[in-house]
Amino acid sequence: APPDMKAEALAALSTWAISSLRDRLDVRFRVDVTREAAPVKAALQTMIEPLLKSNQSAMQIAATKAAAKFELTNTAPTLFALVKNAKTEVKQAALQALTDLKSEQLNDALEVALSDKDSEVRALALEIVPESGLEEEKSVALFEKILDNGTVKEQQSALTALGTLKGESATTLLGVMLTKLRRNAIPLAIHLDLIEAIENQANTDLIEQLELHQSSKKKD
């Protein structure tokens, strides 16, 4: 069968255990049916690895979704390998699957993804980090790299995430960014994001420093 047809079949299997009143192909209403997922999961266990390693992106993406849907945790090493080396859309799908699986390899995958050359992969990783359970110091170190080298949009996302972290490392990095703000050493486009991050983090010392900066700007 053609690769696209195989990918569609795998996608259909991923919805096997989901009760639906509409037919997947012709969307007509049908009798409500809930299927047993165990047989499909057992079958996928024996065939998922070759599908993930396929040279067809559509097949790989369908396989990552199936791995997450049926909680095939044994696929984590292969999913991690895809995050490191695959087409952009496959990297994103593999990273999302590791997230859905709550894999122990997610932290390493996020570090890789945040350093990816493709901005779409980095953007997805930035969305995932705050809810990932990654140690705060590691998260802050990754955000620091984004603030040094990322696009404006990525820097804005990193600052938003920083504002949700309450630890010393996050406070220190926000303090560094505030110093840069005073020196006009950061892009104008992220000024408001930095201010909001400091306000959201609610560290007393940083708030005072920010207020002093804002007061001096008004006098100028």
Image (spheres, helix red, strand yellow):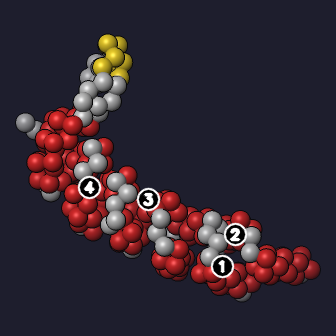
Q: Which amino acid does label 4 sit on?
A: Thr
Q: Residue 144 carries which label?
A: none
User: Separation of disc 3 and disc 4 at Cα?
Assistant: 21 Å
Residue 7 in view:
no
Confirm or deny contact between disc 2 and disc 4 (CB under 8 A).
no
Q: Nearer the viewer, mark 2 or mark 4?
A: 4
Going from N to C along the chain, the mark reached first, 3 or 2, is 3
In the image, farthest residue toward the right: 219
From mark 2 to mark 4, how far is it between C-alphas? 35 Å
Q: Name the residue under label 3.
A: 124
Image position of 159 (left or right of 19): right
Q: Which mark is residue 171?
A: 1
CB atoms of marks 3 and 2 within 8 Å: no
The residue wearing badge 4 is 73
Asked if the residues shown at circle 3 and circle 4 are in contact, with their CB atoms under 8 angstroms apart, the answer is no
Q: Which of 44 and 173 is in front in this view?
A: 44
Q: What residue type is labelled 3?
A: Leu
**CA distance for labels 2 and 1:** 8 Å
Q: Where is residue 147 in the image (x, y as percent from the top left)?
A: 55, 76
> Between disc 3 and disc 1, whose residue precedes?
3
Label 1 vs label 4: CA separation? 36 Å
Residue at horizontal 48 percent and vertical 73 percent from the top:
135
Q: Residue 201 carries which label?
A: 2
Which callout, 1 or 4, points to the residue nearer the camera? 4
What residue sits 74% from the left and 70% below the top? 202
Q: Which quarter shows the C terminus?
A: bottom right
